[in-house]
Image (cartoon, rainbow, N blue to C red):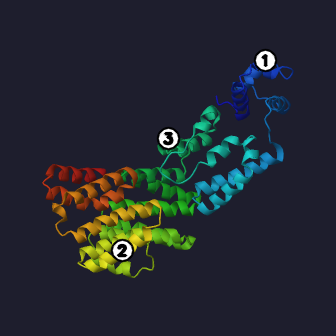
Amino acid sequence: MAVPFPSALIRYERLKRNWSQEGLCEGICSVSYLSKIEQGKAEAGEEILSALIRRLELEWHGGEEAQEARKLLDDLEEACFSLNIEERERLREQLKQKRDVYLNGPHMLDVLLLERLGWGNEPADVRELCTFEECFTQKQRAIWLMVQKRFEEAIQLLPIADTYMESGYMAYYNGQYTHAMERLLRACSLAAEEGRARVLLYARMLLGNCYSDQGDYDAMNRHYQAALRLATDLGDEGAMESIRYNIVATQVQLGMYEKAYQAYTAMDSAYPRLLHKLAVCQEQIGLKEEALQTLDRVDALTRESDMPEDQWAKRMCELVRYRLEHPDYLKEAAYGELLLTMYQDMQKGLPNGYALFHQRWVEEWYVATRQYKQAYELKKKNEFSK
C-alpha cells in the first residue's frame, strides 16, 4: 500500500530532526495514531495534519495555493506529454516563480518530477525524490521512471504516445532499429488517438531517421515527407530544417553526391553540420578547392562556438580536410588515429547514425592497413543492429 505524501513528509522531517514519535505528537494525537499516519494506515484529518506540520516548523501551503499549483502542474504535464516545448518552458518559468511555495504543499512530488521531465539522453538526478518513492501514484511512478530514461518500464504504467516515442528514440539512439520502429509506430497510432500532433511529428521524423541509417531511401523519404507536412501545418521551422537536412545527408551517405550537392547549394542555411556534408559532396565529386573553402567557413563558424554540435562538426571537417590535403592519407598513421578516435567517441556520445555515416572510411582504413578481421566484424555488427 502506497503511503500518502503528507504522511511520508511528516516521517521524513521527524527523522531528519532526530525526534521521537512521542516528542512530535505530544498534545496532538497518540503515539499509536501517529505511527499509523506515518505508515499510511490512517489518514490524518486536516486539524491533526496542520498541527503536526506546525510543530515541525514547516510552512504548509494548502487551500487556494494548492489549487493554483495543481492547475499549473496539470498544464505542465500536458505540455510535456504533447512535446509542446515552448509552452513547457513558459510554464516552467512560471513554476520557478512560486517553486518554494508549491514545494511546501500537497503537490511537492509533482513539482520535483515534472521539473525534471524533458527531452535528452541523460537520466536526471532523482536522489532528492528517493525518500518519497513509496508515496508515488501510478502516474508519478511512471514519470519517475521516465526521468531516469527507463522507458520500457514506464510504458507498463503509462502506455501513452509520448512514452512510446521516448522509448523509440532511445532504441534509435543506440542503433536498435527494429525495436525502435516498433515503438515509434505504436507512438504514431497513439498520438493520432490522443490528438498529440507534435508527438506524431517527431515519431515520424524518428522513423525516417531509422530508415535513413539503414539505407532505405524510399521508406525514409515516405516518413520524412509525412513529417514535413505535419511540421508545416504546425509551423515548426526547426523540424522542417532538420527534415530537409536529414534527407540530403542520407543522399550523401548513400553516395548520391551530385544530387545532394545541388540540394545543398540551393539551401539558404549555412551551419557547420550542413557545411560538413556539403564539403563531403565536393570532395567526392572532385571539387577540391570548393571543398577547402567550405571547410574554411566551418572553421570561422566554430572558432567562437562552444555548442557541442558545432564542435562535432569541426572534428568531422578535420577528417575531410586531412583527406583533401594528403592524397596518400591511407598510408598515414595520423589519419587513422584521427579517424578511429572520432569514430569511437561518436559511438559513445552520439546517435548511432553519426558513426554509421563514417563507417565507410573506417572500413576503408581497415582494408588499407590489412585489418580485414576488423573490417568484417564492423560490417557484420552494423548489419546485425538492423
Relative to residue 94, is residue 125 drawn left or right?
left
In this orientation, which residue lies closer to the viewer: 239 or 116? Answer: 116
Quarter assignment of residue 211 = bottom left
Front: mark 2 or 1? 2
Q: Secondary structure at mark 2?
A: helix
Q: Amino acid at mark 1?
A: Glu
Quarter assignment of residue 225 = bottom left
Q: Secondary structure at mark 3?
A: helix
In this orientation, which residue lies closer to the viewer: 184 or 260? Answer: 260
- Give the Cα distance between marks 2 and 3: 47 Å
In the rendered structure, are the residues bearing label 1 and label 3 in contact, judged by CB atoms less than 8 Å apart? no
Q: Which residue: 52% across, 50% down?
A: 163
Quarter assignment of residue 343 = bottom left
Image spot of residue 149 (x, y percent): 50, 45
Q: Identify residue for label 3.
A: 153
Q: Secondary structure at mark 1?
A: helix
Q: Identify residue for label 2.
A: 296
In this orientation, which residue lies closer to the viewer: 95 or 29? Answer: 95
Q: Amino acid at mark 2?
A: Asp
| Mark 2 or 1, nearer chain start | 1
Image spot of residue 106 (x, y percent): 74, 40
Q: Which residue: 61% across, 43% down?
A: 139
Image spot of residue 273 (x, y percent): 40, 68
Q: Identify residue for label 1.
A: 22
In the rendered structure, are the residues bearing label 2 and label 1 in contact, judged by CB atoms less than 8 Å apart? no
Q: Which residue: 37% across, 50% down?
A: 348
Residue 69 in view, yes or no: yes
Q: Is residue 148 above or below residue 309?
A: above
- Give the Cα distance between marks 2 and 1: 74 Å
The crowding category of the residue bearing disc 3, from other C-alpha atoms within 10 Å (few below 14, some 14 to 19, many at least 20), is: some
Image spot of residue 379 (x, y percent): 22, 54
Front: mark 1 or 3? 1
